């Protein structure tokens, strides 16, 4: 993500009730949100009903409804956007699973290189495992959301979580290993 200092200023202005800042913010971040959505949807089933544009628009509708958020910076904004996209995709997977009773859709679990990692993981199982991980270690849960769902780099994740990049690398390795073990157990 390129650092645009105007995004933080727009977020702060929006947080103070300036509606014009919200529309300027959308213009400033729309393309980047679309790239995040494209990365997410690339891991989904081929005939997914959502397009990147539709996912961004649905996330945007939820973003503008965030009244209690104290906007701090660009990284926090994208972290919340990634979390909302995750929720949208999980909600759709649940609805699809309920309709078909086929166990849900599968997605690729990128960068899991522990042992013989499966290429596809049930999105609902991943969401449940991520919730359990967050209960054990909130920062690791946030890290997975940022790296996996938002596509943040190590450096961007470090800024968003206010930790050193080496901490992100260590926690990322631990979180991937933990998720891999959890997801293997759910497939057994």
Image (spheres, helix red, strand yellow):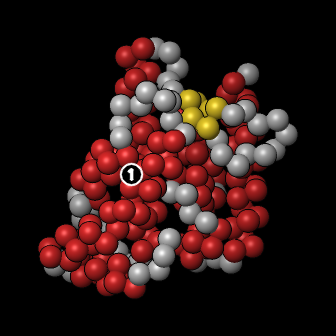
Q: Is 57 located above or below residue 185 in the figure?
A: below
127 with respect to 116 (left or right): left
| Front one among 67 and 25 | 25
- Residue found at the very far top of the displayed protein: 101
| Front one among 66 and 100 | 100
Q: Is 105 located above or below residue 165 in the figure?
A: above
Estimate the x, y position of residue 116 in percent, counting from the top left: 82, 35
Residue visible at 69% across and 74% down?
165
Residue visible at 55% across and 57% down?
151
Residue visible at 44% across and 37% down?
90
Question: Quadrant of residue 185 in the image?
Answer: top right
The answer to whether residue 78 is visible is: yes
159 with respect to 36 (left or right): right
26 with respect to 173 (left or right): left
State how many labels appear.
1
Residue visible at 67% across and 27% down?
186
Q: Which residue is mark 1?
A: 84
Q: Is 158 located above or below residue 45 in the figure?
A: below
Q: Considering the image in quadrants, where does the C terminus appear?
A: top right
Estimate the x, y position of residue 84 in percent, counting from the top left: 39, 51
Estimate the x, y position of residue 12 in percent, counting from the top left: 29, 81
Estimate the x, y position of residue 187 in percent, counting from the top left: 69, 24
Q: Residues within 10 Å of mark 1 (few under 14, many from 20)?
A: many
- Residue found at the very far right of the displayed protein: 115
Callout 1: helix, strand or loop?
A: helix
The answer to whether residue 142 is visible is: no
């Amino acid at each position: 993500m390129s650092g645009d200092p105007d995004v933080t200023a727009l977020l702060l202005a929006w947080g103070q009730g300036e509606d014009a800042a919200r529309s300027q913010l959308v213009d400033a971040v729309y393309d980047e949100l679309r790239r995040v959505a494209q990365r997410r949807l690339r891991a989904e089933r081929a005939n997914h009903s959502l397009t990147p544009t539709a996912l961004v628009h649905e996330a945007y509708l939820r973003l503008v409804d965030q009244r209690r958020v104290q906007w701090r910076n660009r990284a926090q904004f994208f972290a919340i956007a990634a979390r909302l996209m995750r929720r949208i995709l999980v909600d759709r997977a649940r609805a699809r699973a309920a309709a078909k009773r086929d166990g849900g859709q599968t997605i690729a679990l990128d960068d899991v290189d522990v042992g013989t990692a499966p290429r596809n993981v049930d999105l609902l199982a991943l969401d449940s495992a991520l919730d359990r991980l967050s209960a054990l270690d909130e920062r690791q849960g946030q890290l997975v959301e940022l790296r996996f769902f938002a596509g943040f780099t190590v450096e961007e994740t470090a800024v968003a979580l206010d930790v050193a990049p080496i901490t992100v690398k260590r926690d990322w390795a631990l979180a991937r290993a933990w998720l891999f073990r959890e997801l293997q157990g759910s497939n057994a």
